[in-house]
Image: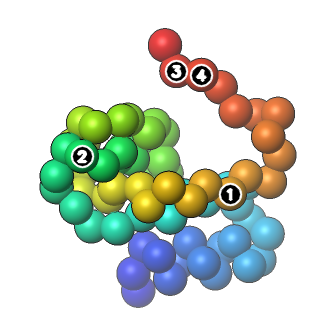
Amino acid sequence: MSRSTITSALWAEGNLDGLIMTMKADDPKWSFVGFDAAGNVNCVVEKQVISDEATVGIYNFKHGCGLRVGR
């Protein structure tokens, strides 16, 4: 089962607090997501290839109050 299929199922069940739509890419013109050991997104980086998952610019969050600015 693909990561996107699993994510869609978890979102539908209410088990996620947000999602970031991604596509496979390797060109640094995009923004990329990084993952922790469990496969959860742990960062988003602008214009630096840190994985093969680039954002398409669509972000969904259950609650905006949990957003933090990286340092």
Cα–Cα gap, marks 2 and 3: 20 Å
Q: Which residue is mark 1?
A: 60
Cα–Cα gap, marks 1 and 3: 18 Å
Cα–Cα gap, marks 2 and 4: 21 Å
Q: Which residue is mark 4?
A: 69
Residue 64, x across and y down, in percent: 79, 40
Please report the residue visible at 66 percent of the width from the left and 73 percent of the height from the top. 10
Earlier in the chain: of badge 1 and badge 3, it is 1
Quadrant the N terminus occupies:
bottom left
Please report the residue visible at 50 percent of the width from the left and 64 percent of the height from the top. 21
Question: Hey, which quadrant is residue 2 in on the image?
Answer: bottom left
Q: Nearer the viewer, residue 54 or 2?
A: 54
Residue 40, x across and y down, in percent: 49, 51
Cα–Cα gap, marks 4 and 3: 4 Å
Q: Which residue is mark 3?
A: 70
Cα–Cα gap, marks 2 and 1: 22 Å
